[in-house]
């Protein structure tokens, strides 16, 4: 799930998609989500796209890479290169033009994999110990994931948790805004199972948002009060 | 409420009090809480202390200022001065040596007041629209305050909310750590009603921490699941 708000200052807010998918159904599906400098992330997505159309290039495209690990490496190399060329290199340009990406997907015959790609181009992979990734404005929505996530959740529950986590962030910070994009990939089909845009008037989102407020208050009231 | 962790890197963690009180029971009570660069905040507290012992100084001490507004101004001026002299001035020293303070208290015959003091030395006051302040690592603990705070809460409930908010932060971020300091001031007494240190084995904190996890899960389960 990703939001769509981008800003260059509080009075310069726009809507841009932050979730991008390349798929060849039955063969491979790759999704990239972006956070950080918009010029950087757009350049990365455009470069990844362009390489698909110029197969004679030295670098293989993400649709030709042998493994998801190689896909993550290609994305990381592209990200690092873009950040370096935007500025004069060095730590300053990393701060000013920095971006962080989540790369997930599956190639037919292999396991689905999920990576978090840093501005330096290196990356880490999700595991049993670190089963989820967040990028961007991560802090407001983190406590509820830490408390409520469980590896044996159903997908229906996991999506509910995403809604609750995003709702907490939306309530607290203007840099994250509706609509949201939600995408799921079904195991071994190597294609997008569902992609939908969740608008502000989305009935399920409204239900979650209002009921979560009530449920939290009930939860809070169920705890014993402090005694002076 | 304040925590006591301070760090200069992940391998250099210490325990320092971040809550400081000056009181003359029945006449005035002033509490300052600190976040940010430790050298800066210690210098500010020391300077405020020193002025009490050198009454001939040009600047009045916070125990002699006429109003809480004047107290906040003195604290803000001291903070700005310390940050300026730590570096060579300018935005860089503000970032490197920055600190933010909360100043609260009451002077006999006047209303209790609460201020948030910025590194630039200026400050804002709590109001009906902005009834609480957080400083330091504020984001993890903010959503629950936004959802559960209500102006007609009892003090017992408000302290419970502080515990829950700090617990969410403690679970998510290493830069905030136990023990916590909790202080209350009773209206018009102009003295500290209760000051206690909440250690890791504190029974009430343990109860809140474990029960909050369970209550959150129940709250989460009470919401309708997403339907594909």
Image: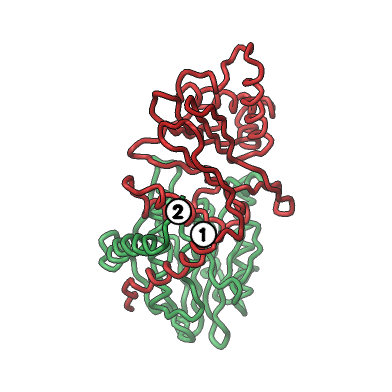
Chain colours: A red, B green
| Closer-to-camera residue (B130/A34) | A34
The residue under the point 49% across, 70% down is B31
Cα distance in 3D space between marks 2 and 1: 9 Å
In this view, the mark in front (2 or 1): 2
Residue A58, compared with residue B100, is above or below; it is above
Q: Is residue B52 left or right of residue B176?
A: right
Q: Residues within 10 Å of mark 1 (few under 14, many from 20)?
A: some
Total marks drawn?
2
In the current view of this chain or complex, which residue is farthest to the bottom? B109
Q: Is residue A32 visible?
A: yes
The residue under the point 58% across, 39% down is A19
Residue B189, compared with residue A66, is above or below; it is below
Q: Is residue B15 visible?
A: no
The residue singled out by tag 1 in the image is A204
Q: Where is residue B119? Give x, y as percent.
A: 61, 56
The residue under the point 62% across, 14% down is A55
- Quadrant where the image shows the C terminus of chain A: bottom left
The residue singled out by tag 2 in the image is B227
Q: Where is residue B138? Give x, y as percent.
A: 50, 57
Task: Evaluate if marks 2 and 1 touch, with contact meaning CB atoms under 8 Å apart.
Answer: yes
Chain ID of residue with mark 1: A
Q: Is residue A80 left or right of residue B179?
A: right
């Amino acid at each position: 799930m990703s939001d769509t708000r981008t800003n260059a200052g509080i009075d310069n807010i726009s809507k841009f998609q932050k979730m991008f998918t390349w798929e060849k159904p039955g063969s491979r599906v790759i999704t990239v989500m972006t956070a950080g400098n918009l010029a950087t992330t757009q350049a990365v997505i455009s470069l990844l796209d362009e390489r698909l159309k110029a197969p004679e290039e030295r670098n293989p495209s993400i649709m030709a890479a042998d493994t998801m690990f190689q896909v993550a490496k290609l994305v990381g190399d592209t990200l690092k290169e873009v950040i370096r060329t935007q500025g004069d290199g060095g730590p300053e340009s990393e701060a000013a033009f920095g971006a962080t990406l989540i790369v997930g997907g599956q190639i037919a015959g292999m396991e689905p994999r999920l990576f978090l790609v840093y501005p330096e181009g290196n990356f880490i992979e999700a595991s049993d110990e670190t089963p989820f990734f967040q990028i961007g404005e991560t802090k407001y929505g983190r406590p509820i994931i830490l408390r409520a996530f469980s590896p044996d959740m159903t997908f229906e529950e996991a999506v509910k948790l995403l809604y609750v986590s995003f709702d907490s962030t939306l309530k607290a910070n203007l840099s994250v805004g509706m609509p949201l994009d939600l995408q799921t990939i079904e195991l071994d089909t190597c294609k997008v199972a569902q992609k939908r845009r969740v608008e502000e008037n989305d009935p399920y989102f409204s239900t979650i948002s209002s009921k979560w407020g009530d449920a939290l208050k009930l939860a809070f009231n169920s705890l014993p009060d402090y005694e002076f």
